[in-house]
Image (cartoon, helix red, strand yellow):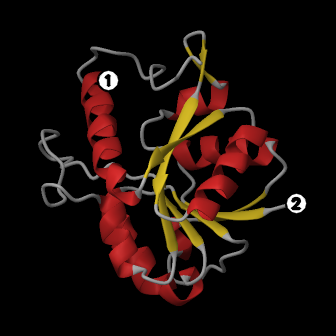
Amino acid sequence: MATITIFGTGNMATAIAGVLNAGGAQINHIAHEQATGGDIAGDIVVLAVPYHAVNEIISNYADQLAGKTVVDITNPLNFETFDSLVVPVGSSATAEIQQALPNSRVLKAFNTNFAGTLSSGKVGDTPTTVLIAGDDQDAKQALAAAITTGGLNAVDAGALNRAHELEAIGFLQLTLAAGEKISWSGGFGLNN
């Protein structure tokens, strides 16, 4: 049985934990209150926190994150205006994390999903699909296996530079849901 550490205890952290636990993984949560004193267990670490919390985690856990697969779920939105991303044009939060953690295998995943669709396993009548981007093929395959064993679909969305597009999709979905143009039970699913 795999052990996976999830930073965060909110809706997304809980939904991701449910999927991965359904696939047989043992989940270790590190709450914000433990941001300086938790222990990372397992080879996969999920950053299920707001984008602005990532730097503190990197500062406090860089040594423990070395050699691990680090899964970035953030959408780096400007939450004051809700009208832009706060990373440089053409870059991504995931690329910034990879630069800060050169000895980790950083992936982008779960940012195009809402917690409800992860928990239900459905977007309407379509199975929930998790898109995964990153440069390490083995890390992507291990995460995809944990997701599909947990009952969802997983699709390799390409190299780490595709995180830029995934964050744009996440941004669009969030702004549409916040503007009540789509529901929070909407999301991303692919039919084969």
- Mark 1: which secondary structure? helix
At a point 42% along the width and 80% down the height, the residue shown is 101
At a point 58% along the width and 85% down the height, the residue shown is 64
Give residue 108's position: percent from left, percent from top: 45, 54
Q: Can residue 109 be seen by looking at this rendering?
A: no
Say above or below: 106 vs 147.
below
Residue wearing tag 2:
1
Whole-Å distance between the Cαs marked 2 and 1? 36 Å
Q: Quadrant of residue 72?
A: bottom left
- Mark 2: which secondary structure? loop
Asked whether 49 or 85 is in front, the reply is 85
Asked whether 34 or 185 is in front, the reply is 185
The dot on residue 177 is 1
Q: Quadrant of residue 26?
A: bottom right
Q: Quadrant of residue 82?
A: top left
Give residue 21's position: percent from left, percent from top: 78, 47
Q: Can residue 24 be seen by looking at this rendering?
A: yes
Furthest residue in direction bottom, as rendered: 63
Is residue 63 rendered to the left or right of residue 44? left
At a point 46% along the width and 63% down the height, the residue shown is 135
- Quarter of the figure that contains the N terminus: bottom right
